[in-house]
Amino acid sequence: QVQLVESGGGLVQAGGSLRLSCVASRDIFSYAMGWYRQAPGKPREFLALITSGGSTNYADSVRGRFTISRDNGKNTVYLQMNSLKPEDTAVYYCRAGVAYWGQGTQVTVSS
């Protein structure tokens, strides 16, 4: 069992930056870790993935603006978000493997 807690969300103006953190309750070195988001009335959307070996993959909508990273020593995965747009407004979720989700953190981007 892995508990995940996201933080770092908030209100930011368009063009601004935020860094989200996801802290796990135990070691995550063997897990692929991902970030997703869900806007009101829309399905949950994949954003970024980092494998246990450090390889990364991004959705087209965020490639070049968002960066996923991990610190296994701190059981933490990050999502650096730059050049934010109003359409990035959503609840952002962390995922460990395929089974474990965090509770989400709200990101609101004002125009």
Image (spheres, rainbow, N blue to C red):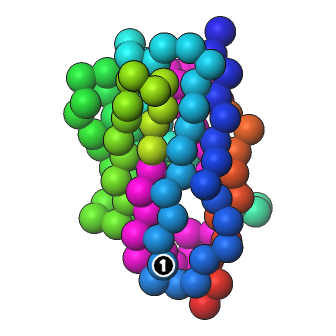
Residue beneath the point at 37% across and 59% down: 66
The image position of residue 32, as x and y in percent, is 40, 24
Q: Quadrant of residue 4?
A: top right
Residue beneath the point at 67% across and 35% down: 5
Residue beneath the point at 40% across and 70% down: 82
The image position of residue 70, as x and y in percent, is 37, 35
The image position of residue 68, as x and y in percent, is 37, 46
Q: Is residue 92 magenta?
A: yes
Q: Is residue 104 above or below residue 26?
A: below
Q: Residues within 10 Å of mark 1 (few under 14, many from 20)?
A: some
38 or 72, which is in the foreground?
A: 72
Give the SS element for disc 1.
Answer: loop
Q: Which residue is mark 1?
A: 16
Q: Amino acid at mark 1?
A: Gly
Would you say residue 34 is visible in this rendering?
yes
Would you say residue 32 is visible in this rendering?
no
Q: Is residue 91 above or below residue 86?
A: above
- The residue range painted magenta reads 79-101
How many numbered marks appear? 1
Q: Is residue 81 magenta?
A: yes
Q: Residue furthest front?
A: 73
